[in-house]
Image (tube, rainbow, N blue to C red):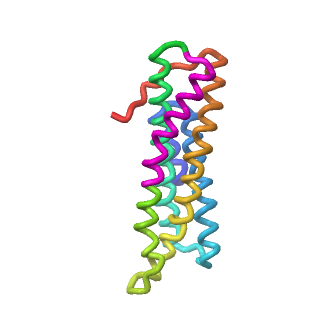
Amino acid sequence: MVIFIIFILLYFTFKDFWESLIIMLSVPFALVGGVLLQYILGYNFSVAVWVGFIALFGIAVETGVVMVVYLHEALDRKLRAGPVGKKELYEAILEGAVLRLRPKLMTVGTTLIGLIPIMWSTGTGSDVMKPITAPMIGGVITSAIHVLIVTPAIFGIMKERALKRGTLKISGITLH
């Protein structure tokens, strides 16, 4: 239900089914990392683990949204500057992805710095907190790989098709 609600909110924001779907692809990648670390650490599915997954899905979608916004802004700058061909399209995508690289790595780093000490804790409440953080740690790592590599690639394929059809236009999406 949470995934469906997130998708509906994305659709209302971007007003495009395919862009919403691109962003939602970060959820299965995050899920893979979360389940893998949960399995390695031997945690069973519980309410605490599901809370961790829900938080992870929010983080994964948020970083996907920010990446798509950066890609759109870079592409919009190229479109405003003049005619855009395949070369300019991929230059814009590379520019947007590179602009997002350092902030994404810093976000992953600070998230891990905040969560890893919880995995080492032994005090009161650690038995509840460890299962919450396990899926988040694993999922943040795999989600980062997806958002930095796969999202720009899929975005490029999608926009290249729009360019070929002659429907590539300024998005109007901004960070401000």
x then y, percent, for residue 149: 60, 45
Which residue ends up furthest to the bottom in the rendered image? Answer: 123
Look at 60% across and 59% down and name the residue there.
Answer: 31
Residue 112, placed above or below residue 63: below
x then y, percent, for residue 74: 47, 29
Residue 165 located left or right of residue 48: right
Residue 17, placed above or below residue 38: above
Look at 49% across and 13% down and name the residue there.
Answer: 82
Q: Nearer the viewer, residue 107 or 25?
A: 107
Residue 44 located left or right of residue 75: right
x then y, percent, for residue 83: 54, 13
Q: Magenta span covers which residues? A: 84-106
Residue 169 located left or right of residue 87: left
Q: Nearer the viewer, residue 37 or 5?
A: 37
State yes or no: residue 98 in magenta.
Answer: yes
Look at 40% across and 67% down and name the residue there.
Answer: 114
Q: What secondary structure characterizes most of the magenta part? A: helix
Do we see residue 12 in this rendering? no
